[in-house]
Amino acid sequence: MNIERSNNNIGLYIHIPFCIKKCLYCDFPSYPGHEHLYHAYITALCREITDRGGIFCPEIVDTIYIGGGTPSLLPVELLDSILSCIRQNFTVSENVETSMEINPGTINSNKLKEIHALGVNRLSFGIQTFSDELLYGIGRIHSAAQGIEAVKQAKHIGFNNISLDLMYGLPGQTVIDLAQSLSSAVKLQVNHISVYGLKLEEGTPLFDAHAAGVIVLPDDDAEAAMYDYATDYLPANGYHRYEISNFARKDYKCRHNLKYWRYRPYVGFGAAAHSFYRGQRTGNVVDVGEYIERLNDNCSPVSITEHPGRDQAMAEYIFLSLRTTEGLLLPDFSLEFGADFIKKYQPVITRLSNQGLLAIKKNKIALTPLGMKYGNIVFRSFLPD
């Protein structure tokens, strides 16, 4: 049996919705400023953790992910309060992976030392690009030099599990720009690199600027060339591709994110946080003020509860599993749903295989390199009618 499916361990996601300045492409639930709400929010967050912790007594927490927003904005004493509250209300593995997102424009050596002392052992730096011009164009608050220096400081302090987020398809970006950023990332000798294509979301400043013709994005051919370059360059430099957008050196896959892709349970705390537990998906209220008010009134912050039907659950399982290079393990699918994957989806499998998008291997189904490039076409094919 796949080890990832043979235990009752869960992951925790902690959402910190505050930032200094919202990036021009960002549609995540985040609030620039609002320093006056930090303490009230963390008090409410810890109350939610305490209220719900007892529900998950049998499970061991083996991953914690603090995301945002910009978690590195928080004073260290508030981060300490969160982690202490988790330890008081959950059974936490001695080998827990504790990740935290870092904006290089919000961090210094002293704060990194304090974060390290709290037990955080994995950092995810939102670098996006090592071009100052491109950083300015997407509204990032840090410079390329700040990004490089922050990573070097973290390594010097003792963080050895460091991930960098990079983006392609940015306004004005070329393949050469991306190549230079990838080279800079590899030179920093981090153990994990994520590369995401820019997606314009309606309602963001970048979407509006593009619609008005103020900015020009790389055309489809240029963006495809960037994708091809990244997916060739990183494996050639020792980073194994284990998911569509994620590359890691040996033993440095993000264990928390693997829970999402492997249909394993996770529990989210904070405004806009989502959970998946025993087949049920829940989501908390998005508005920070409402979140605080609900917890202060001893009310649940959950605003969305979904129980996916069997066919929908199967579809979710399929496209999450297929995002990984390991693919969908047929025995695991059968164990999860009591169904034969090949028999149920034979026409779809045959069509996608003939199109060169899907590969049938012993005991598993996986995307081909072409399928990785056009994954959404594959995923849509498994959605229920």
Image (tube, grey):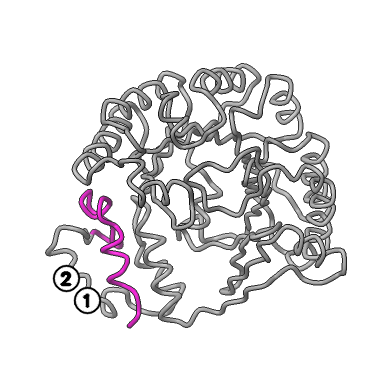
Q: Residue 54, percent across and down? A: 80, 65
| For residue 334, side relative to residue 360 (left or right) | right
Q: Where does label 2 land, which residue? A: 350
Q: Residue 35, percent across and down? A: 77, 42
Q: Quadrant of the C terminus?
A: bottom left
Identified at 74% across, 38% down, the residue is 74
Q: In this rendering, is residue 342 above or below 366?
A: below
Q: What amino acid does circle 2 point to?
A: Thr
Identified at 80% across, 48% down, the residue is 37
Contact between labelled residues 2 and 1, with CB atoms less than 8 Å apart:
yes
| For residue 374, side relative to residue 149 (left or right) | left
| For residue 280, side relative to residue 48 (left or right) | left
Give me the C-alpha separation between circle 1 and circle 2.
6 Å
Q: Where does label 1 land, which residue? A: 346
Where on the picture, by quarter, is residue 166?
top left
Q: In this rendering, is residue 241 above or below 1?
A: above
Q: Residue 187, percent across and down? A: 41, 18
Q: Quadrant of the N terminus?
A: bottom left
Q: In this rendering, is residue 55 above or below 117?
A: below
Q: What amino acid does circle 1 point to?
A: Gln
Farthest residue toward the left? 354
Q: Residue 301, percent across and down? A: 74, 68
Instruction: Please provide the residue range marked out in magenta.
Output: 361-385
Farthest residue toward the right? 297
| For residue 345, side relative to residue 62 (left or right) | left
